[in-house]
Image (spheres, helix red, strand yellow):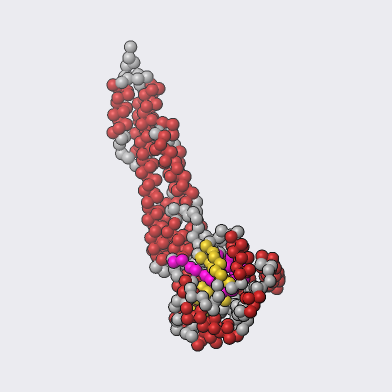
């Protein structure tokens, strides 16, 4: 015998609660699917009370899951669109435009309100919803929450590019005596490692050719010049691969260091024993693309491949050194940065249209005015170093990439010091 319809006060209360809940979500009426479902299970089919309530709740959860999926897509679309707009302004050097502040505020508000979305999602009974659909919703929400957790750092990255004072390519460093002593010890250790990594004596043929043995510039001085050259390339080769070569690379330690800055780092060496040592060293490191070329710098024809060319008196004969300097300048592309940390090179550079940018950096095929303009632009770049990271948060990818191309990254301490 079927139960009379009038004996369903609990179902009626559930129906009213559902209507109230949907209205609180911004909807004026109960969804049609739920209304028909309710009529079917309480009037036509007439199941018992528990079955009726369970079926109705299942439909409510399914409807809520659909709504949440749509809402999540809308939240992500809105944030990604604003992140792309911020990146576009940064790319066009409009970081101080008022639009950036407005977009940052809009993104911040959406990130902060995401907790309300997560609360709504947690109220859904996952067992009563399609497993595949709910799993994807949970996966997407978790990914977006991870991206949103980075927002504070991303906003700081953008702020670091606003109203920023130019930083010289060779900043004046007033180091405490204790720091100077630490740098000296570090340089001594690196020099000792260089001898350990390349213990062989210079080849007699290389000595007869006029090559210096493997005696390198102190590492701290080398990195100071290298960092300045990298910042120049952020202006000269923005968004393009950056290639470095060390002329007379010896055991390859400077090439190893340059691989942390540039997309490709190479060494050119005449001494075959040194070539073998350098290749063995670089084989053990997987940081970037590196190579060691066995050849004569005085006959090398491929200088035009590279964007930064480093040489530190690789020839012990003044005549051969001048020949090498002239060959490098004549065979390099206009705009190539030469990194020559010794005073004598300035004479050759001034004679061959290779003006000084700053410090020990020179610009091939340029006028002094063009070199000065490059220096001024490079001073507005950030101080962070290196190629693109292997994994980037999808939501913030446009901001992170544009910032990286300008020398900025989410690395605590760098930009704070630059200010």
Q: Nearer the viewer, residue 16 or 237?
A: 237
**Residue 37 position within the rendered picture, expressed as x and y whole percent measured from the top left:** 31, 28
Q: Position of residue 247 (x, y in %)?
A: 56, 74
Q: Residue at x 43, y 38 (%)?
A: 135
Image side of residue 5 versus residue 337, left or right: left
Identify the residue at image location x=47%, y=85%. 353
- Quadrant that contains the C terminus: bottom right
Quick one: quadrant of the N terminus? top left
Q: Residue at x 50, y 55 (%)?
A: 390
Q: Position of residue 314 (x, y in %)?
A: 60, 78
Q: Which residues are magenta?
A: 240-259
For the residue pair 333 and 52, the one nearer the viewer reads as 333
Residue at image position (70%, 73%) is 177
Along the horizontal axis of the image, is 164 left or right of 220?
A: left
**Can the viewer see residue 227?**
no
- In screen coordinates, is 396 left or right of 31? right
Residue 261 in percent (x, y) is at 54, 66
The number of numbered discs placed on residues in the rendered structure image is: 0
- Quarter of image, res 136: top left
């Amino acid at each position: 015998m079927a139960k009379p319809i009038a004996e369903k006060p609990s179902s009626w209360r559930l129906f009213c609660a559902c209507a109230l809940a949907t209205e609180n979500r911004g909807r004026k009426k109960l969804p049609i699917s739920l209304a028909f479902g309710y009529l079917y299970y309480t009037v036509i089919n007439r199941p018992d009370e528990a079955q009726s309530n369970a079926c109705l709740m299942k439909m409510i959860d399914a409807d809520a899951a659909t709504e949440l999926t749509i809402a999540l897509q809308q939240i992500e679309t809105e944030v990604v669109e604003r992140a792309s707009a911020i990146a576009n302004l940064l790319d066009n050097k409009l970081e101080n435009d008022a639009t950036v502040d407005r977009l940052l505020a809009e993104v911040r508000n959406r990130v902060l309100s995401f907790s309300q979305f997560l609360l709504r999602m947690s109220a859904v009974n996952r067992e009563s919803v399609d497993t595949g659909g709910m799993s994807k919703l949970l996966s997407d929400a978790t990914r977006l929450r991870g991206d949103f957790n980075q927002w504070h750092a991303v906003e700081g990255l953008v702020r670091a590019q606003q109203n920023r004072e130019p930083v010289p390519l060779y900043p004046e460093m007033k180091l405490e005596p204790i720091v100077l002593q630490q740098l000296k010890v570090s340089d001594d250790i690196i020099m000792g490692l260089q001898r350990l990594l390349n213990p062989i004596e210079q080849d007699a043929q290389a000595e007869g050719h006029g090559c210096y043995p493997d005696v390198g510039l102190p590492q701290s001085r080398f990195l100071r010049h290298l960092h300045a050259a990298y910042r120049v390339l952020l202006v000269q080769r923005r968004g393009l691969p950056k290639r470095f070569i060390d002329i007379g690379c010896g055991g390859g330690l400077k090439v190893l260091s340059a691989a942390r800055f540039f997309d490709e780092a190479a060494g050119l060496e005449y001494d075959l024993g040194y070539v073998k040592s350098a290749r063995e060293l670089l084989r053990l490191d997987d940081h970037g693309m590196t190579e060691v070329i066995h050849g004569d710098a005085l006959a090398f024809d491929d200088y035009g491949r590279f964007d930064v060319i480093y040489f530190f008196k690789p020839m012990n004969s003044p005549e051969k050194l001048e020949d090498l300097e002239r060959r490098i300048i004549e065979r390099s592309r206009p705009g190539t940065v030469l990194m020559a940390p010794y005073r004598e090179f300035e004479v050759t550079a001034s004679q061959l249209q290779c003006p000084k940018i700053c410090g020990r950096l020179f610009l091939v095929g340029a006028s002094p005015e063009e070199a000065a303009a490059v220096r001024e632009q490079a001073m507005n770049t950030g101080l962070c170093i290196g190629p693109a990271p292997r994994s980037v948060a999808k939501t913030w990818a446009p901001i992170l990439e544009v910032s990286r191309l300008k020398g900025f990254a989410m690395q605590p301490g760098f930009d704070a010091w630059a200010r």
